[in-house]
Image (cartoon, rainbow, N blue to C red):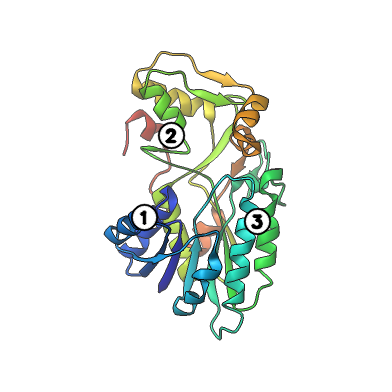
Amino acid sequence: MRVLLLGGTGSIGSAILEDLIAHGHSVTALARSEKAATVLAENGATPLFGDMTRPEEWAPALAGFDALIQAAAAFDTDMGAIDKKLLDAIAENTAERKIPLRVLYTGGCWLYGETGERIADEMTPFDPLPSFAWMVENWQWLCQADGIAPILIHPAMVYDQHGGVLSRYIEAAWNGQPIEIWGTPDAIWPLVHRADLASAYRLAMEAAPAGQSYCVAAEDGVSTGSLADAIAARSKSAIPHRILPLEEAIERHGDWAAGPALKQRMGSAKIRRELGWRPRFEDAISMLRGETL
């Protein structure tokens, strides 16, 4: 398939790019700079110069693609407005298509809010963090747009052996600093390795029916305290973890900081059953301890 990838130089986007190329797809990726274009070209993509905040400049090129994957993310206060402007431009340039553009839109586990011991799935009502409520609204709008076959991916917390969502923890431990846990060490994170998430995007792009959503988690829930313990053990750090009160984390980093303090679980039975998704990494603790790679 001919794919336009947004966010192709990011942690998740670069994994998606690698997976798509490995499976024979032709990938063009949006590049905001010459540096980004060079990286994308080295990884097998054709760069398309453009900026997420000015989609009207490059969206007419969508006529030449079968699918678009939105893997770009930012935690700016205006991210909802930027995203809606992007979707408006996509819809404006696909309305007359005879074959709809397959658009893979990214949601996330934080759209389900606090779940406790209950495992969220695609039938669970949304209860998003207020700072991410726009994702639900934009997805619902996208489902009504002409010329688009929308598919929604809900990634769990994304990691790899170098960090991802765990980057703060790993950097602190290896630099002899206390690992800072926001809220409580009893917070629960559903987890997925970036390589496994990438294969989920590809499988959904290739075979998912329009309008479907998929939760993507290799592990339905692991406590932040146990993750921090595993990283400290690997780095041989004996420094006690630091618990940062949630109110202080939000004051420092913004409202989105409430996400890492949630106690939530999320499953993946649907994507395993319908699309044959099989994650290769299902034990983050062992990986972080250095027992597996």
Taking the image as shown, residue 193 lies to the left or right of residue 266, namely left
Q: Is residue 138 visible?
A: yes
Disc 3 is placed on an element classified as: helix
Across and down, in percent, residue 105 comes to: 56, 61
Q: Residue at x 53, y 46 (%)?
A: 156
The label shown at residue 81 is 3
- Kind of residue indicated by mark 1: Ala
- Across and down, in percent, residue 267 comes to 57, 48
Please give the name of the residue rendered at 40% of the width and 22% of the height, measured from the top-left corner. 173
Quadrant placement of the N terminus: bottom left
Of mark 3 and mark 1, the one earlier in the sequence is: 1
The span from disc 3 to disc 1 (Cα, nearest Å) is 24 Å
Q: In the displayed structure, does residue 57 sit left or right of residue 161?
A: right
Q: For the residue carrying disc 3, how many other residues have a C-alpha within 10 Å: few (<14), some (14-19), or many (20+)?
A: few
Asked if the residue at tag 2 contacts the one at tag 3, i.e. Cβ–Cβ closer than 8 Å, the answer is no
**Side (left or right) of 14 relative to 96:** left
Look at the picture and state if 62 lies above or below 120: below
In the rendered image of this protein, does residue 261 appear above or below residue 2?
A: above
Answer with the quarter of the image where residue 284 lies: top left
Q: Is residue 272 above or below residue 243?
A: below
Q: Which residue is mark 1?
A: 36
Q: Which residue is mark 2?
A: 167
Q: Amino acid at mark 2?
A: Ser
Q: Are marks 1 and 2 in contact (CB under 8 Å)?
A: no
Q: Amino acid at mark 3?
A: Ala
